[in-house]
Image (cartoon, rainbow, N blue to C red):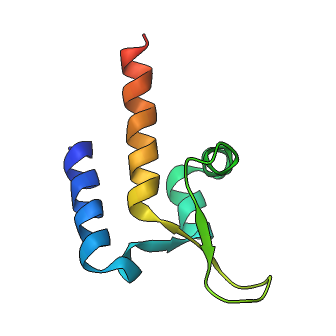
Amino acid sequence: MQMSELGAANYAKRIAPAKDAISQREAYRSFGEARVKRWISQDLISSVRSGDTIRSKVLYSLAELISVETSEKIAHIVNR
């Protein structure tokens, strides 16, 4: 089921890239703030600002987030 969700997210990213973006607040709520910050520090995901100012919204790719989460879960299962 997770792989189908990942496939759907990647498809949506290709068809409508703007709909793939979620805000930092949504990413923290969905995936956990500590995990998202760790993925950023490890350069596993990238962020984009929606504007030029420091106060503009930070956006992440939902497909990237799902992909990193899925690979993390699979690595945990494989390395048992």
Q: Residue at x 22, y 55 (%)?
A: 7
Residue 77 to residue 21: above or below: above
Q: Residue at x 40, y 82 (%)?
A: 18
53 versus 20 height, above or below = below
Identify which residue, 28 or 15, lies in the foreground. 15
Compared across the picture, whether 10 is left or right of 19 comes to left
Residue located at (56% from left, 47% from top): 44
* Quarter-of-image position of residue 27: bottom right
Query: Where residue 43 sits in the image (x, y, percent)?
Result: 62, 48
Return the residue found at the far right: 54
Q: Position of residue 13 (x, y in %)?
A: 32, 70
Question: x%, y% of residue 32?
Answer: 59, 50
- Against 1, residue 22 (above or below) is below
Count how many numbered circles sit on residues in the image: 0
In the picture, which quadrant includes the N terminus? top left
User: Which image quadrant for residue 20?
Assistant: bottom left
Residue at the spot x=39%, y=48% of the render?
Answer: 67
Query: How far from the left and from the top, in percent, is residue 9?
Result: 29, 62
The quadrant of the picture occupied by the C terminus is top left
Q: Nearer the viewer, residue 30 or 65?
A: 65
Residue lying at the far top of the rendered structure: 80
Is residue 54 toward the left or the right of residue 37 in the image? right
